[in-house]
Image (tube, grey):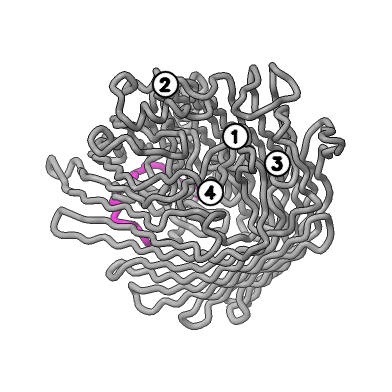
Amino acid sequence: MNRLFCVLIFLIGFHNVFAQKPVLKEKVLDDRVANDTTQVSRNSTTNEGLKDENVTIDLYKIISHSRDTTFVDTTLSIKKEYKYNYLRKDNFGLMPFSNIGQSYNSLTYNFLNTNSLPLFAARARHFNYMEVEDVNYFQAPTPLTELMYKTAFEQGQLMDAFFTTNISKQFNFSIAYKGLRSLGKYQHILTSTGNFKFTTNYVTKNGRYQARAHIFMQDVMNQENGGLTEEGVVNFETGNEEFLDRSVFEPNFENAENILRGKRFYLEHQYNIIQRNDSITNNQLAVGNVLSLEDKFYRYDQTARSDFFGEAFRQTALRDRVTLENFYNRFFLNYRNDIVGDLSFNIDYDNYNYGYNSLVILDGQTITNRLKGNIVSLGGSYKNQIGRFNVQGDLGVNVSGDFEGNFLKAQASLKITDDIKALATFNTSSKAPNYNWLLYQSDYVDYNWDNSNSFENISTQQLAFELQSQKLANLSFDYSTITNYAYFSTDDLGNVKPFQTDATINYVRLKASKEFKYGKFALDNTIMYQQVLNGDNILNVPQLITRNTLYFSSHLFKKAMFLQTGIVFNYFTEYHMNGYDPLLAEFYVQNDTELGGFPRLDFFINAKVRQTRIFLKAEHFNSSFTGYNYYSAPNYPFRDFTVRFGLVWNFFL
């Protein structure tokens, strides 16, 4: 945790240093202020000769990877309650494990895909791993710092520190570090994670050249214990008083850990050959380039062999290590016109190197150690506003290399009224299964396979509709078909292995969200119904997921404080919940045990004083009187009643 405090002191020092830098006043791009009255006064003379200007919150811009622009929001709302967690986003549809930073069991799936290449291994470790699409860039008229703190489970804490500033109107950079250490209530489930982020973006004064870049360093370490033994499950479910102290449980093993690490260097820049000028021309022609270099490795360490995974090539000092080196290069040409729209063409080059440093000979067959090669793909995108319709599309296809793949995404939206917006999306894709389905090596005998020549591409098609309305409700519906679905499951001997089905799976989801308000009281509801029309033993999901929050909001102390307090109810129906394999750091299909059907009640008191938001929550306070049947995965109990608190603090100078 010393790293957290060093980063904290470093960012506060940065904040104080850059607070003395004058910044030019910027034009507001987004007039949505979200009822945030935050204002930051600065008495300084800028290069434009401006004096005594009030800088409003809407000037602190957040620019997504897809260039959608929002701004910093320091309000306190029920949406902030949902996002105040380890992931810093709404985790509806995810079932967390007992310790913060472990993993999440997925209760629902979205098969929308715009990727034509396999993904890296250990997907259970990737919930907190930020991909390129998750990165935001910033514009800030004055230095901005945000500090987030939350208590963890025994001997640890979660802290997320962020700082951004503009050196000039054209140049911004940000630096951030999110760190976690939590011991957990059960034996040998310590988590320790770190996410270092640096971003920068630059544009010339005439706007012809634009560039943005980021550097990410990420590591996610989890101690693993294999969950409770069968005897431990009985003692847990019967509520045996001797085991209410969860640290007395003996798990399946206490000598293993896995870790995922990654580093990425990313640059995206473009030059406008023809500059758009409203007084002369509405045309713009630009050329650009994207470069990305990313290295990942996943490692599983165990001091001695465990019967939990079967026979092994060695009895002590077991270590599985797999790496992926990926170099990505894109050249693109973009044309914009008020009538034609926004049209882009791109050619992509991927160089990948996935695998191990040794060969495995098993039952007379040699399991290769690497999948490596080059992929060349072509693609394009289109956007346009036609009357009240907004249309956009993306496509890509691999034209050379060992992995075939393609995708097409088409979307149209219509603003029916000022309050009602409708969207329709069609997506089709075909790509190879993830790398660890194709090739895996381990010191454990049963965890070695090579399916690179036998597994087919996974094909998906999805049709989705969405209706957005504050007055009526937010509704979404999607229907997906999946062919050659790949998954992990157990074989006849109980060993976890990759499988692929040639059957077509049909999967439908319907989600509704609506908030009802009466005076200072409100009831916020999110309900999802889903059904697998065939393939029930392969893709298992609960039929119903619901989250309902009854809360009270009011200003106190002459509006010096804004308070929200209420109860959150979470529930999903019983189903064959996926099991968790700690060696692979993957979830697998099981059809022996049904879990779910238990309520989770949380009581919260949140308050805002100026730019500080304070959060206090009694999590799962019903755990002792509604039955000990709550699990995150088979043999992995969910957390008991606990009280946690924290805050989010913004500094504007």
Mark 3 to mark 1 CA distance (whole Å): 11 Å
Tell me which numbered mark, 3 or 2, is placed earlier along the sequence: 2
* Residue 218 image label: 1
Q: Badge 2 local density, few (<14 within 10 Å), some, or many (20+)?
A: many
Tell me which numbered mark, 3 or 1, is placed earlier along the sequence: 1
Q: Where is mark 3, residue-wise?
A: 294
Q: Nearer the viewer, mark 4 or mark 2?
A: 2
Q: Is 432 situated left or right of 393 in this image?
A: right
Q: Could you tell me residue 338's position as x and y percent?
A: 58, 78
Point out the stretch of residues depicted in magenta. Answer: 32-47
At horizontal 13% and vertical 40% (from top left) the residue drawn is 557
Q: Are marks 3 and 1 in contact (CB under 8 Å)?
A: no
- Tell me if residue 339 is in the magenta stretch: no
- Tell me if residue 33 is in the magenta stretch: yes
* Residue 136 image label: 4
Tell me which numbered mark, 1 or 2, is placed earlier along the sequence: 1
Q: Where is mark 2, residue-wise?
A: 249
Q: Badge 4 local density, few (<14 within 10 Å), some, or many (20+)?
A: some
Q: Nearer the viewer, residue 442 or 283?
A: 442
